[in-house]
Amino acid sequence: MLNTVARVGKVLKLFTTERPEWGVTEVATALSLPKSNAHDMLASLAGIGLLERLPAGRYRLGWRLLAMSRNLVETDGFQRQAETVTQLMARRLGHISSVATWDGRRLVCVAANGRLAGVDGPERAPGVRLPGHSTALGKMLLAHRAWEEVEERATVDGLPAFTEATVATVGDLRAQLDGALRDGVAFDYEENQRGVCCVAAPVRDASARVVAALSVSMPPAVLRRAEPQYARAVAVAAHRLSAMLAAPVEADGAQQLAASA
């Protein structure tokens, strides 16, 4: 039993930011296992959600791990820390600030503070489920998943339109996710709700994995007037929240923005 648990641990450790996908033969070679054993172990881990099998027959970390990661950061005080950071952001900027993470296959709000003057702001409260493709929070988190996985889900579930600006094609979604990875921030220009725009940045844990995203929501004219400044402010806040989780310093887009603030 202990040998099996230890072997599972070795399998999961193979999946890193630098190499997020592995095939059966590669795992067998890396761990000096018979190919049949590697296949059975990968299939079993995928069966319980710790791994996810991609269309090409390769594997990456599964959604269940992200849900477990959410439970971990919450029991470590992450929700309280997220509440503190969003309160400070809302007070400083005068807009809604939110933090969300994955709960299995869905986006869930962890903390939210602030309001939008004259606008019925987005429903943001701990536990509220949010769409992924139409929100800046969701796009930032989707950007850090394997594209094959995102594409498969978008094809199966579709891309429901919440406004006329909601991303409508898988190709457009990929372009937005690529931009989020490149720039370190994701945007929602009235894609989820008319009259509301958002900018979001990633929050990382101690292993450098993106476990959440932090955003600020505001009227379109406000964001368009000062998009770079809001992007930097959100990146700085996300970086600070990551630091609370002892995230290592990395040269990703969000941290470059934070460093330039």
Image (tube, grey):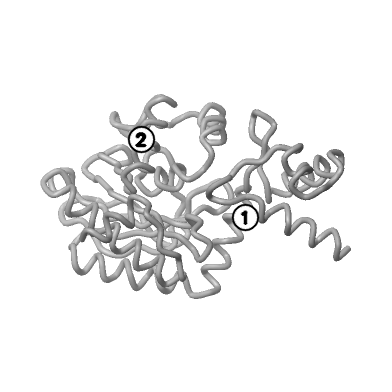
> How many marks can you see?
2
Chain-order first, disc 2 or disc 1? 1
- The image shows residue 174 at horizontal and vertical percentages of 42, 31
- The image shows residue 217 at horizontal and vertical percentages of 26, 52
- The image shows residue 92 at horizontal and vertical percentages of 19, 67
Name the image quarter holding the N terminus: bottom right
Q: Which residue is mark 1?
A: 65
Q: Is residue 37 above or below residue 165?
A: below
Residue 176 bears which disc, if any?
A: 2
Q: Residue at x 35, y 46 (%)?
A: 136
Crowding around mark 2 (Cα neighbors within 10 Å: few <14, some 14 to 19, many 20+) is many
Q: Amino acid at mark 1?
A: Leu
67 or 235: which is nearer to us? 235
Q: Residue at x 85, y 65 (%)?
A: 2
62 or 18: which is nearer to us? 18
Q: Residue at x 36, y 44 (%)?
A: 135
100 or 142: which is nearer to us? 142
Name the image quarter holding the C terminus: bottom left
Mark 2 residue element:
helix
Residue 126 bears which disc, if any?
A: none
Q: Residue at x 33, y 57 (%)?
A: 255
Mark 1 residue element:
helix
Q: Is residue 47 left or right of residue 95?
A: right
Q: Amino acid at mark 2?
A: Gln
Crowding around mark 1 (Cα neighbors within 10 Å: few <14, some 14 to 19, many 20+) is some
- The image shows residue 154 at horizontal and vertical percentages of 51, 31
- Measure the C-alpha gap from mark 2 to mark 1: 25 Å
Are the residues flagged by discs 2 and 1 in contact, CB closer than 8 Å?
no
Q: Is residue 85 left or right of residue 18?
A: left
